Image (cartoon, rainbow, N blue to C red):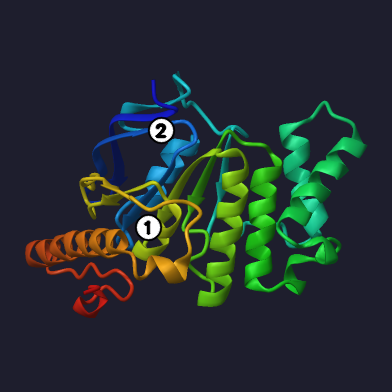
């Protein structure tokens, strides 16, 4: 039995001109301790998929199972890190994290709450900013607060919905390393939603493309045959990295061309051009 299962998931939305099937026949299995990345185009239905897994939305048909039980709503067992930080602006770093700790462990003592919050804030190197408000933080620091908040709930699974997409390259790379370091300590099951192929290869055990909707469905999986811990500089010269990267990019470009010819809409991943192919 897989840790997370999506069985024949379809999701429809009612619109003025009728009903649109956003996701179609989604089947996915993630094992305990596995790190999986789903990569896809903007507007392909990735966030809808996250909302179904987290219990924020219900599928039109099919079922989502977590540890063998149907997902019927949100749970602190599945911690989500969003792209837009979702911090309460009137609360400090500590208070934002404490709010999550209290929700996950309502029967624990106040001193335990504070220790847990302090531990995860320190884990993302934000102890010096513990009493600052979000407006006093950089974008990267805010995202680190969001990471600390999700981890402080001790989730069995971490779900990341393009959490690093709005960051500059240096901050993004540093946070990738921090998230991987935290994940490697206890190997919590992780799902990363991203539109960055390199990020998916660097972080995940396997990558699964999401074909753009309507009627979006998952494509073939690509297993990442790279030893951990991974070094970005060395990885660029690794033949397995080059082969996997080229295969994924070629698949996504073919999808983009196919969709463009069908609907006359452009589906473009950032910097997804022929120059990206590694020789």
Which image quadrant: the C terminus? bottom left
Report the label total.
2
- Where disc 2 sits, the SS reads loop
| Residue visible at 7% across and 66% down in the picture | 261
Q: How far apart are the alpha carbons under marks 2 and 1? A: 30 Å
135 horizontally vs 4: left or right: right
Around disc 1, counting alpha carbons within 10 Å, would you say few (fewer than 14), some (14 to 19), or many (20 or more)? many
Can you tell which mark lies on residue 248?
A: none
Of the pair 212 and 228, the residue shown nearer to us: 228
Of the pair 237 and 44, the residue shown nearer to us: 237
Position of 35 relative to 93 (above/below): above
| Residue visible at 63% across and 71% down in the picture | 139
Around disc 2, counting alpha carbons within 10 Å, would you say few (fewer than 14), some (14 to 19), or many (20 or more)? many
For this orientation, the residue located farthest to the bottom is 275
Of the pair 126 and 240, the residue shown nearer to us: 240
95 horizontally vs 11: left or right: right
Examine the image and state in which quarter residue 77 appears. top right
For this orientation, the residue located farthest to the right is 111
Examine the image and state in which quarter residue 31 appears. top left
Query: Could you tell me residue 18's position as x and y percent?
Result: 22, 46
| Residue visible at 47% across and 51% down in the picture | 228
Q: Earlier in the sequence, mark 2 or mark 1?
A: 2
Looking at the image, can residue 189 be seen? yes
| Residue visible at 45% across and 55% down in the picture | 203
- Where disc 1 sits, the SS reads helix
181 horizontally vs 194: left or right: right
Circle nearer the viewer, 2 or 1? 1
- Circle 2 is placed at which residue position? 58
- Circle 1 is placed at which residue position? 201
């Amino acid at each position: 039995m897989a840790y997370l299962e999506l069985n024949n998931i379809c999701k429809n939305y009612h619109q003025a001109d009728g009903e649109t099937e956003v996701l179609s026949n989604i089947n996915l299995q993630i094992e305990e301790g596995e790190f999986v990345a789903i990569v896809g185009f903007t507007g392909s239905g990735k966030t809808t998929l996250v909302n179904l897994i987290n219990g924020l939305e219900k599928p039109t048909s099919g079922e989502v199972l977590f540890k063998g039980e149907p997902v019927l709503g949100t749970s602190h067992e599945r911690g989500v890190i969003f792209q837009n930080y979702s911090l309460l602006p009137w609360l400090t770093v500590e208070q934002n994290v404490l709010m999550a700790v209290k929700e996950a462990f309502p029967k624990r003592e106040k001193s335990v709450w504070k220790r847990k919050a302090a531990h995860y804030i320190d884990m993302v190197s934000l102890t010096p900013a513990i009493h600052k408000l979000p407006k006093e933080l950089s974008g990267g620091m805010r995202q680190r607060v969001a990471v600390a908040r999700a981890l402080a709930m001790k989730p069995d699974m971490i779900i990341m919905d393009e959490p690093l997409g709005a960051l500059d390259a240096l901050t993004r790379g540093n946070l990738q390393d921090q998230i991987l370091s935290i994940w490697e300590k206890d190997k919590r099951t992780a799902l990363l939603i991203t539109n960055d192929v390199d990020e998916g290869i660097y972080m995940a055990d396997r990558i699964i493309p999401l074909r753009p909707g309507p009627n979006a469905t998952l494509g073939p999986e690509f297993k990442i045959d790279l030893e951990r811990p991974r070094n970005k500089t060395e990885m660029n010269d690794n033949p397995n990295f080059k082969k996997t990267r080229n295969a994924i990019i070629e698949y996504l470009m073919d999808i983009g061309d196919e969709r463009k010819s069908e609907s006359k809409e452009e589906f473009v991943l950032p910097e997804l051009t022929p120059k990206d192919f590694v020789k």
